[in-house]
Image (spheres, rainbow, N blue to C red):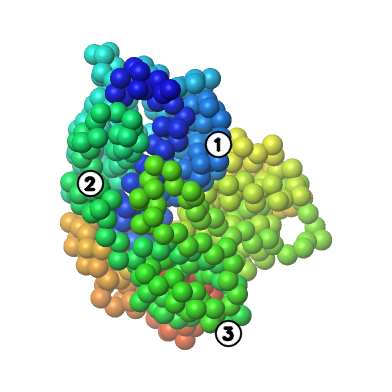
């Protein structure tokens, strides 16, 4: 006999309820991912907030599905552990820390009462703030804090679990609305914080699922379902009958190349569905697509090589079985080991990189393991931890080479028995500069000190395209225009790629510099890159220019200036 039925509607949650809540909320969240991503302020290809959060939630849901015990405390610990290992990006790590704090609050609990939920959520906020070295208000942290406050006051009034969660959502919505005015970038773009919205959608999904899961056992079958915050910005999601997926099969795979090149793969797949991600590195491609014809996707992929880790999930079935989905596929990065080395130092080097050219350069400069990832395919904690554990050395230095991977890398320090240091390299050129100071004969501490010092003179320039319309510092940006960026600022907006690249180079070379290295990407041939180098040379005849193949997707050119 269930205690919930005895004590009243929404009074107590048991393991089965908690498990269904996490799994159902993950599906609830997944349908909002693209819209949450659309709130990202900077209109460039990047590791988007919604994508990183759903990957983190999928790992948590997979963990909940594997638990067969009867303790909510134990289940919450499993969920938190899996979420941490699957965490991607800053938003994913913060979400995993909220779940970790909740697990701390539910330790040794057999079920969840409103009071216990309130205390657990407060722990979640504390853990989330502690995870960030410099907490910023107007983000997911602000929304989490106000949600915890909402639960606290609701419980003090004597509200039951569902009423307390509803009050948390109301408080969170008020806080979310205020984020627009708390951060200048959000105010200029006229949007709320994407991470804060993601947290609200997750909690709304929890409540939505709980009411469905208990509806069969309680006389509240027609109780109103909570309105989704995302639905006010996006669409109404009310019942399984209203779901109409044009591309119901979530299809993922890895291709090990046999064809001469992987060029054209993305173009061929783009007509088969939506939410397409194609990440390539030398002889490997990682594919993710929502499609109505997975067979055609597989057939096309076979033209390029052998298929591995194939996963095809029917999202329509997942929706109808929200209460107990069988699995949640979790993407993982590809770990590419370096060549066998005659000289193995005290410290191993892990570099996050994308693009076959960059891979070869990082390996040649002393990297021991490459974790494939970057702008749109952020690796998770487990990927980086596995790379560290693969090293023969007892200490390691991680080069994230992306600002959205630094917090993920920091989590490895507490998970590994090895001595791990994370250098806050925010770009690939910064990672390369750090490596130039690495000496395998030196100690970990000496290497970290020297590598940090070598980062200081490096300026990075990026040439890419706008993924959506936006206004940045009063400048109107149209989808598809070419952008030149430096130090997280849009320097130039152009209709022609060549103009964007040349104007960006001139801007970052305005101050006296000695060397510029041009890394040209996957979509640029060497001839065009040479023309750009010659144009720069005309304006700066004393400048030393190096031309390297980076092979990176999405970013046509990456400049390293010293």
Distance of label 3 from label 1 (alpha carbons):
45 Å
Q: Is residue 300 above or below residue 27?
A: below
State the residue lying farthest toward the bottom.
Answer: 527
Which residue is identified by label 1? Answer: 67
**SS for tag 1?**
loop
Which residue is identified by label 3? Answer: 260
- Residue 223 placement (x, y as % from top left): 21, 33
Q: Residue at x 54, y 78 (%)?
A: 302
Which residue is identified by label 2? Answer: 238
Q: Residue at x 31, y 24 (%)?
A: 10
Q: Is residue 82 above or below residue 353?
A: above
- Of residues 68 and 495, the one nearer the viewer is 68
The N terminus, quarter of image? top left
- Of residues 272 and 470, the one nearer the viewer is 272
Q: Is residue 300 left or right of residue 141?
A: right
Q: Is residue 146 left or right of residue 13?
A: left
- Residue 52 placement (x, y as % from top left): 42, 50
Q: Residue at x 38, y 68 (%)?
A: 291
The 10 Å Cα crowd at callout 3, few under 14, some 14 to 19, many 20 or more, is few
Distance of label 3 from label 2 (alpha carbons):
48 Å
Q: Nearer the viewer, mark 3 or mark 2?
A: 2
Q: Is residue 183 above or below residue 319?
A: above
**SS for tag 3?**
loop
Q: Are marks 1 and 2 in contact (CB under 8 Å)?
A: no
Residue 10 is tagged as none
């Amino acid at each position: 006999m269930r205690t919930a039925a005895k004590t009243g509607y929404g009074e107590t949650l048991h393991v089965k309820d908690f498990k269904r809540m996490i799994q159902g909320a993950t599906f609830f969240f997944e349908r909002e991912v693209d819209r949450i991503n659309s709130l990202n302020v900077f209109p460039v290809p990047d590791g988007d907030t919604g994508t990183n959060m759903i990957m983190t939630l999928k790992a948590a849901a997979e963990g909940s599905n594997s638990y067969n015990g009867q303790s909510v405390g134990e289940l919450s610990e499993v969920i938190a552990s899996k979420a941490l290992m699957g965490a991607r990006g800053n938003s994913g790590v913060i979400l995993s820390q909220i779940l970790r704090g909740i697990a701390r609050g539910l330790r040794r609990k057999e079920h969840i009462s409103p009071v216990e939920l309130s205390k657990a959520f407060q722990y979640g906020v504390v853990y989330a703030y502690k995870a960030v070295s410099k907490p910023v208000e107007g983000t997911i942290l602000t929304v989490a804090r106000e949600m915890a406050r909402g639960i606290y006051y609701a419980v003090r009034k004597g509200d039951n679990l569902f009423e307390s969660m509803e009050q948390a959502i109301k408080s969170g919505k008020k806080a979310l609305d205020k984020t627009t005015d708390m951060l200048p970038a959000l105010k200029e773009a006229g949007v709320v914080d994407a991470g804060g919205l993601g947290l609200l959608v997750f909690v709304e999904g929890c409540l939505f699922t709980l009411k469905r899961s208990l509806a069969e056992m309680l006389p509240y079958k027609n109780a109103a379902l909570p309105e989704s915050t995302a639905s006010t910005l996006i669409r109404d999601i009310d019942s399984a009958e209203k779901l109409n997926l044009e591309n119901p099969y979530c299809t993922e795979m890895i291709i090990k190349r046999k064809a001469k090149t992987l060029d054209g793969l993305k173009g061929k797949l783009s007509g088969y569905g939506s939410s397409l991600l194609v990440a390539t590195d030398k002889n490997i491609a990682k594919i993710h697509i929502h499609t109505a014809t997975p067979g055609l996707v597989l057939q096309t992929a076979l033209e390029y090589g052998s298929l591995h880790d194939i996963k095809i999930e029917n999202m329509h079935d997942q929706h109808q079985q929200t209460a107990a989905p069988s699995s949640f596929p979790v993407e993982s990065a590809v770990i590419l080991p370096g060549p066998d080395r005659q000289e193995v130092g005290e410290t191993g080097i892990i570099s996050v990189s994308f693009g076959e050219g960059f891979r070869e350069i990082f390996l040649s400069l002393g990297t021991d393991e490459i974790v494939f990832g970057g702008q749109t395919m952020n690796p998770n904690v487990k990927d980086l931890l596995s790379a560290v554990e693969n090293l023969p050395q007892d200490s390691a230095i991680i080069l994230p080479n992306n600002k959205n991977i630094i917090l993920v890398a920091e989590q490895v320090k507490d998970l590994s028995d090895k001595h791990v240091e994370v250098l806050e390299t925010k770009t690939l050129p910064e990672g390369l500069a750090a490596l130039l100071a690495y000496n395998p004969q030196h100690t970990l501490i000496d290497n970290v000190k020297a590598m940090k010092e070598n980062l200081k003179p490096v300026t990075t320039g990026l040439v890419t395209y706008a993924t959506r319309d936006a206004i940045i510092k009063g400048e109107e940006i149209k989808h598809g225009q070419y952008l030149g960026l430096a130090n997280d600022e849009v320097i130039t907006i152009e209709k022609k790629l060549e103009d964007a690249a040349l104007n960006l180079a001139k801007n970052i070379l305005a101050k006296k510099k000695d060397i510029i290295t041009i890394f040209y990407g996957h979509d640029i041939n060497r001839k065009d890159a040479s023309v750009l180098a010659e144009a720069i040379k005309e304006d700066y005849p004393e400048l030393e220019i190096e031309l390297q193949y980076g092979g990176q997707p999405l970013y046509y050119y990456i400049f390293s200036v010293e």
